[in-house]
Amino acid sequence: MKILVLNCGSSSIKYQLIETQNRDVLAKGMIERIGMSSAVLTHSPKGKDTIRIVGEILDHSIALEYVIAVLMSKNHGVIQDKSEIEAVGHRVVHGGETFSGSVLITNDVLKAIKDNIELAPLHNPPNIRGIEAARKHLPNVPQCCVFDTAFHVKMPVYAYLYGIPYKLYRRYKIRRYGFHGTSHRFVSHRAAELMNKPYEQLKIITVHLGNGASMAAIKNGQSVDTTMGFTPLEGLLMGTRSGDLDPSIVTYIMGKEGLSISEVNTLLNKHSGLVGISGESSDMREIEQAMMEGDKKAKYAFDIFTYRIKKYIGAYSAVLGGVDAVVFTGGIGENSVRVRKAVLTGMEYLGIEFDEQLNENIKEDGEITKPDSRVKVFRISTNEELVIALDTEKIVKKLK
Ligand code: ADP
């Protein structure tokens, strides 16, 4: 089945056309700077050169028209007609407490996503614009959505409630939701596959380290805790986000620096984390480079980043009552030999015997622990688009 996977941000659309039968990506690309005078379309059809087109694209609806047109274009296209697109799968960030799995988009579902806008004011509105655009340009094509939050929705009450008055949970739905669920689900399944063991019988800790970073504790196929919270700000140190901090710091900084609510939000979400501590960069490659050149603050940033991961592995192995596998994924988790080494050094007490050679040389999905290591550690490439395509296929096949 040919499925168009869409990930719509406030000024961008990322897309992939996936043939699910052989998990083949026929084309992928993105449009950036939607709504600005010079939007950029980058399109990579399978087996052909990548092209880049610059022009004015006013909104998501026009952007999607361009995407469909380039997918059908004579020289750079991969389909003859848009009727070849059999379904559309959308990434939607926040499903609130409503959705614990992927669903077909109906009017009721769209309304529920709109009802959750308050929980994700930056993310759900562009996701909705993408859904509405796809409904307009591909009117007879079934559409599904896959939520970042869904995998975590069933975690136990004591893991998702915060220690604030319960009525605030009732009134405003303030609770831990967690994000990156599609990635945690995908890589934990893949780990079970690599271990050749039933997913439902494993205790897995997944470590997704990209620009945003989060971990999940997965017991018998169910996420039972995760580091991101009410918003993606909580938990690990990230490229530009602070992660965990004493909430009193927020009001203290606001008082001292005279910051408004929106300014302190920006400080914690955009100017903290790796970039805030190093004063250099939010990019782990640049942090590592600066650290190797002796930059003290870059080293602090690296150390805080890896220390927190180590701390949460300890916490989650306690939560799970032991651990069978730890999985590293995301741009940093998949590629940074140093980050994995810093986290995994000194974890023998837990049963992790990591293999330095394997860690240095691994490029594909696989294990980086010694054969007799009680806990297996894997490096696995995440593939959220494939999950969206496969979930969509499953839902759409049931309609037929
Ligand atoms: P996003 O969360 O935006 O999808 P990615 O998953 O692509 O981001 O991760 C981006 C991060 O991965 C950046 O911090 C980048 O520096 C880091 N990264 C990519 N390759 C390497 C590498 N070889 N070594 C260290 N960090 C890397």
Image: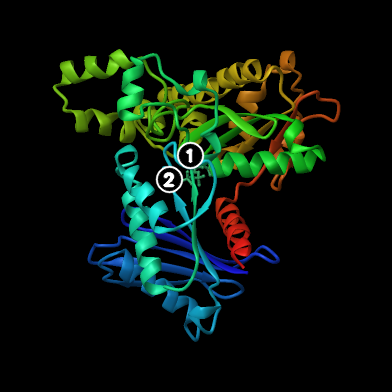
Measuring from the top left, give residue 217's x and y in whole percent.
61, 27
**Disc 2 on helix, strand or loop?**
loop
Q: Earlier in the sequence, mark 1 or mark 2?
A: 2
**Residue at horizontal 42%, vertical 71%?**
67
Compared to residue 327, the image places residue 106 above or below, namely: below
**Disc 1 on helix, strand or loop?**
loop
Residue 58's image quarter?
A: bottom left
Q: Is residue 15 left or right of residue 33?
A: right
Q: Nearer the viewer, residue 145 or 187?
A: 145
Q: Is residue 258 visible?
A: yes
Measuring from the top left, give residue 7's x and y in whole percent.
44, 56
Residue 244's image quarter?
A: top left
Q: Is residue 127 left or right of residue 101?
A: left
> Alpha-carbon neighbours of circle 1 within 10 Å: few (<14), some, or many (≥20)?
many
Query: Coloured how?
Result: rainbow
CB-based contact (under 8 Å), mark 1 and mark 2: yes
Residue type, mark 1 in image? Thr
Q: CA distance from mark 1 to mark 2?
A: 7 Å
Measuring from the top left, give residue 91's x and y in whole percent.
47, 52
Q: Pointer 2: what residue?
A: 93
Measuring from the top left, give residue 173's x and y in whole percent.
36, 29
**Residue at horizontal 16%, vertical 28%?**
260
Instruction: Tell me the quadrant of the picture where the N terminus can be found.
Output: bottom right
Residue type, mark 2 in image? Val
Q: Nearer the viewer, residue 275 or 294?
A: 275
The residue most toward the bottom is 74
Instruction: Tell me the quadrant of the picture where the C terminus can be found.
Output: bottom right
**Residue at horizontal 34%, vertical 68%?**
63
Q: Is residue 356 visible?
A: no
The residue most toward the right is 372
Q: Pointer 1: what residue?
A: 149
